[in-house]
């Protein structure tokens, strides 16, 4: 029979009414983004905003060349040709620079005075008293109240770090890094000493670390090695209202830790008032409210629905800049593409304005912020703008709650955000645009009232806010693929996922689909337990297909090459394309192309960089991001450490790259596509159309392979395949027999059917044996319970006493 996980079968769509104006506009997307994208893709490859350094547009935007783009890499090369890059690579320059004051308040007060001004300071003693008296508490305080930066320091000052670390989890990498940097400045200690942070592939915490900020995924992986989290005295689950996938799983795990360890304290913080749910989950624990200190925000709605939210946001920002009082602008956009298009359009219109205007136009400093942006450019949003310039920050929902930027007086809220939602038609997760929830819209408007009275321009109608938005966001666990979570829970010996304590149980369709995908990859056996490959896959902080690719590299004797490819896929794109040197950069990129594969192209780039002693000037000459390549080198080093711990030797196939393509096929055969027309493919499993991206090594070749596998699909104007490799059709049949088989003659078809029937019979036998085992276990459990009850009912009979009475419990008679 089929196990039913929840009453709700399908993934939850984070939308209230699919026929509403906002839902229709979110599906249509922005015409301005399409127009700008077409302009750029005509030149064959996608341009990234931070690649403008040294170009004319870059000068207008104020994007300067960074040290890595100007200087050669001065790394010392050993006799073996290896570089000890770990010596000086602990911090990038932006993490060493001290933050600058932006608002008048921050300029006029010292850091210790700023700490005392935060709303949390006024309730410091009451808060610490509640923490002392309870093992679990929920703290509610709006963004900017000081929860994230101050709570850890208060616990340190109160002596909690004498017997362990204070850990604080963040749903986002950018927040973990920037908050750790700020707290180290407040404590006047070097980052990595008393205050550290850990994100995937980057651990900046030492033996002296007392306060550690980390992503929730890092803490989740730590529970694999140490289920009781013994090194932590207190864990603060920050930004819990965001309900990220890892946070929801951590809730269930930490609930058990709290029950086992009486000395352990858990603090859950939330910026919204729906904290009662967290309190109830942990057994009606106390909720502590931090009083707010925000200024009034004037909210202005659009009169009519905006057909193009990017165009409307650009116009509104220019209007504010020209007509309004001083104060920085924050625009909430949906994702990287839209942010880059907004920055491009703003810069273009500012240039037109400056050239056509007779009077002086004040400078506008346009700053993007999203997770894939290089970290030194992310840090720019916290830096002071030059004199007479106004900052305009264009951000994803990361600026809703995770980051607090000083000096914002104007917020432009498009009303949309990108969410990862499982798409049953594609059989995988897809990032799609949806209207945000009311709670998120309120958080966005609150950003304008941090340093003074502000204004929020909502690019949607008041009726849309009241009628078309959900009250709260849908938790990620109810709408995405759960492959990693299932793998993790299975490794924690939770065989039946029904036993796990989820705050909001995931839909059965998601769980079953994730288990099926893991079975297809060979991580789970026919009865849903981890296989030997599955146990090894758990060790890697990678998506299951990438972990499978590594392990297949070992079998096919090409681990060294596969390791490099996996590392390159784990960092943002290493190619850069300055606008005024587009043709040169395209020509440089084409030199690295390996015609059969984008994956092998990445391998080729890394090998050439290594052959040139990892030099920075070589990267600049070949239009490559030295920062991205260095990050890939660090990731590679960490994955090698994991391979050593598993006693897996490093093997190489030299230049025989066909076996590398086979290893790639073993991990992504479920994303196989066959040729249908010129440059057009269809997914072999569901017939969905997919196209080669113009930046692919296979695009524009004299021939197009009949079969390819791809890393992921990008849903824009078309469905583009990202990172494509040509494969042999018989590999698909060999590595993915559950999906593919080779057409054969009649006799072999009969044999094939017989083989299928035998496999089905053996699987049914396996399931029947498991069912018998479970019945026997249940019978044994009931027998033990019955024996226990019988023992409890047994009584000692004493002479002279009525049955059931006791010498100790008889009431004394008066006078005796």
Image: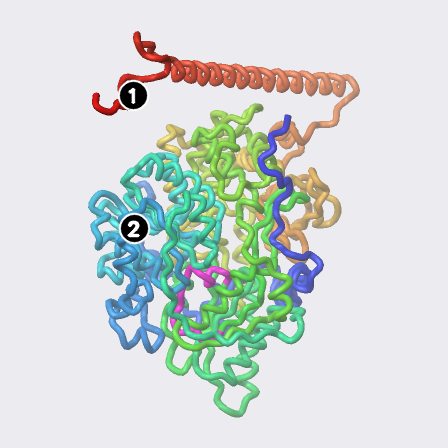
Residue 335 on image: x %, y %: 54, 60
Mark 2 neighbour density, 10 Å: few (under 14) some (14–19) many (20 or more): some
The residue lying furthest to the right in this view is 746
Residue 517 on image: x %, y %: 58, 35
In the rendered image of this protein, does residue 620 appear above or below residue 349? above
Q: What element carries label 1?
A: loop
Q: Is label 2 or label 1 in front? A: 1
Q: What residue is pinned by disc 1?
A: 810
The image's mark for residue 700 is none
In the rendered image of this protein, does residue 37 appear above or below residue 787? below
Image quarter (top left, top right, bottom left or bottom right) of the N terminus: top right
Where does the magenta region start and end? Answer: 396-410
Q: Which of 698 and 388 is in front in this view?
A: 388
| Residue 303 highlighted magenta (yes or no) | no
> Would residue 653 be found to the left or right of residue 769 on screen?
left
Residue 142 on image: x %, y %: 41, 63
Q: Is mark 2 on a helix, strand or loop?
A: helix
Residue 169 appears anywhere in the view: no
The residue lying furthest to the top in this view is 799
In the rendered view, how is the structure colored?
Answer: rainbow
The residue lying furthest to the front in this view is 815
Q: Which residue is drawn at 47% across and 70% down?
A: 393
> Would residue 262 be found to the left or right of residue 275 on screen?
left
| Residue 407 highlighted magenta (yes or no) | yes
In the rendered image of this protein, does residue 554 appear above or below residue 746? below
> Would residue 632 be found to the left or right of residue 261 on screen?
right
The image's mark for residue 131 is 2
Q: Which residue is drawn at 37% across and 65% down?
A: 291
Q: Which of 103 and 774 is in front in this view?
A: 774
């Amino acid at each position: 029979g089929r196990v039913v996980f929840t009453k709700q079968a399908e993934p939850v769509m984070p939308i209230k009414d699919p026929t509403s104006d906002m839902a229709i506009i979110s599906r249509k997307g922005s015409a301005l983004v399409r127009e700008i994208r077409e302009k750029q893709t005509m030149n064959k490859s996608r341009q990234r905003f931070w690649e403008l350094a040294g170009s004319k547009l870059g000068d207008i935007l104020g994007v300067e060349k960074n040290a890595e783009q100007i200087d050669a890499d001065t790394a010392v090369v050993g006799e073996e040709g290896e570089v000890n890059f770990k010596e000086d690579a602990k911090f990038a320059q932006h993490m060493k620079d001290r933050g600058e004051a932006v608002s008048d308040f921050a300029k006029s007060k010292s850091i210790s005075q700023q700490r005392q001004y935060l709303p949390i300071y006024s309730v410091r003693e009451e808060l610490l008293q509640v923490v002392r008296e309870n093992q679990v508490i929920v703290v509610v305080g709006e963004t900017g109240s000081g929860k994230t930066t101050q709570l850890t320091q208060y616990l340190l000052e109160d002596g909690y770090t004498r017997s362990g670390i204070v850990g604080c989890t963040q749903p986002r990498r950018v927040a973990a890094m920037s908050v750790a940097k700020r707290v180290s400045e407040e404590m006047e200690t070097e980052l990595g000493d008393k205050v550290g942070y850990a994100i995937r592939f980057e651990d900046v915490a030492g033996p002296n670390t007392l306060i550690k900020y980390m992503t929730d995924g890092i803490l989740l992986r730590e529970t694999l090695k140490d289920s009781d989290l013994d090194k932590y005295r207190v864990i603060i689950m920050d930004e819990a209202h965001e309900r990220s996938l890892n946070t929801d799983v951590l809730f269930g795990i930490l609930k058990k830790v709290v029950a086992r360890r009486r000395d352990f304290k858990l603090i859950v913080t939330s910026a919204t008032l729906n904290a009662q749910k967290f309190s109830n989950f942990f057994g009606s624990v106390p909720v502590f409210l931090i009083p707010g200190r925000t200024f009034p925000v004037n909210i202005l709605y659009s009169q009519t629905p905006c057909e193009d939210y990017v165009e409307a946001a650009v116009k509104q920002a220019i209007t504010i800049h020209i007509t309004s009082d001083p104060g920085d602008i924050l625009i909430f956009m949906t994702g990287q593409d839209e942010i880059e298009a907004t920055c491009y359009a703003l810069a273009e219109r500012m240039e037109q304005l400056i050239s056509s205007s007779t009077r002086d136009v004040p400078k506008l400093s346009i700053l993007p912020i999203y997770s894939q942006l290089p970290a030194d450019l992310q840090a720019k949003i916290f830096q002071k703008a030059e004199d007479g310039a106004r900052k305009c920050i264009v951000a994803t929902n990361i600026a809703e709650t995770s980051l607090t930027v000083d000096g914002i007086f104007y917020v432009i809220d498009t009303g949309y955000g990108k969410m990862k939602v499982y798409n049953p038609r594609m059989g995988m997760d897809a990032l799609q645009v949806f209207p945000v929830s009311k709670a998120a819209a309120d958080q966005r408007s609150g950003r304008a009232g941090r340093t003074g009275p502000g204004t929020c321009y909502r690019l949607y109608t008041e009726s849309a806010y009241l009628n078309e938005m959900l009250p709260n966001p849908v938790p990620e666990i109810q709408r995405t693929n759960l492959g990693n979570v299932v793998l993790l829970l299975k490794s924690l010996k939770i065989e039946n996922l029904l036993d796990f304590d989820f705050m909001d149980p995931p839909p059965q369709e998601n769980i079953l689909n994730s288990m099926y995908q893991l079975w297809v990859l060979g991580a789970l056996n026919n009865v849903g337990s981890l296989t030997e490959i599955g146990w090894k896959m758990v060790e890697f902080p990678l998506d299951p297909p990438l972990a499978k690719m590594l392990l297949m590299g070992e079998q096919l004797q090409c681990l060294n090459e596969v390791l490099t490819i996996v590392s390159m896929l784990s960092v943002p794109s290493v190619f850069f394309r300055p606008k005024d040197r587009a043709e040169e950069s395209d020509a440089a990129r084409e030199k690295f192309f390996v015609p059969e594969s984008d994956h092998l192209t990445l391998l080729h780039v890394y090998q050439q960089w290594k052959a040139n002693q990892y030099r920075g000037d070589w990267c600049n000459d070949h239009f490559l991001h030295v920062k991205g390549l260095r990050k890939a080198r660090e990731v590679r080093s960490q994955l090698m450490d994991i391979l050593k711990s598993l006693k897996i030797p490093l093997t190489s196939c030299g230049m025989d790259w066909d076996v590398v393509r086979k290893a790639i096929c073993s991990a992504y055969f479920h994303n196989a596509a066959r040729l249908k027309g010129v440059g057009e493919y269809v997914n072999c499993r569901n017939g969905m159309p997919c196209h080669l991206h113009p930046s692919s090594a296979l695009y524009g070749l004299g021939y197009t392979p009949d079969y390819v596998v791809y890393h992921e699909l990008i849903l824009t104007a078309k469905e583009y395949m990202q990172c494509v490799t040509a494969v042999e059709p018989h590999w698909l049949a060999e590595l993915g027999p559950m999906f593919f088989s080779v057409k054969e003659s009649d006799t072999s078809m009969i044999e094939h059917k017989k083989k299928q029937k035998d496999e089905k019979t053996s699987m049914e036998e396996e399931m029947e044996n498991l069912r018998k085992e479970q019945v026997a276990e249940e019978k044994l459990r009931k027998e033990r319970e019955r024996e226990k009850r019988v023992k409890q009912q047994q009584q000692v009979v004493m002479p002279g006493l009525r049955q059931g009475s006791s010498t100790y419990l008889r009431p004394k008679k008066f006078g005796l």
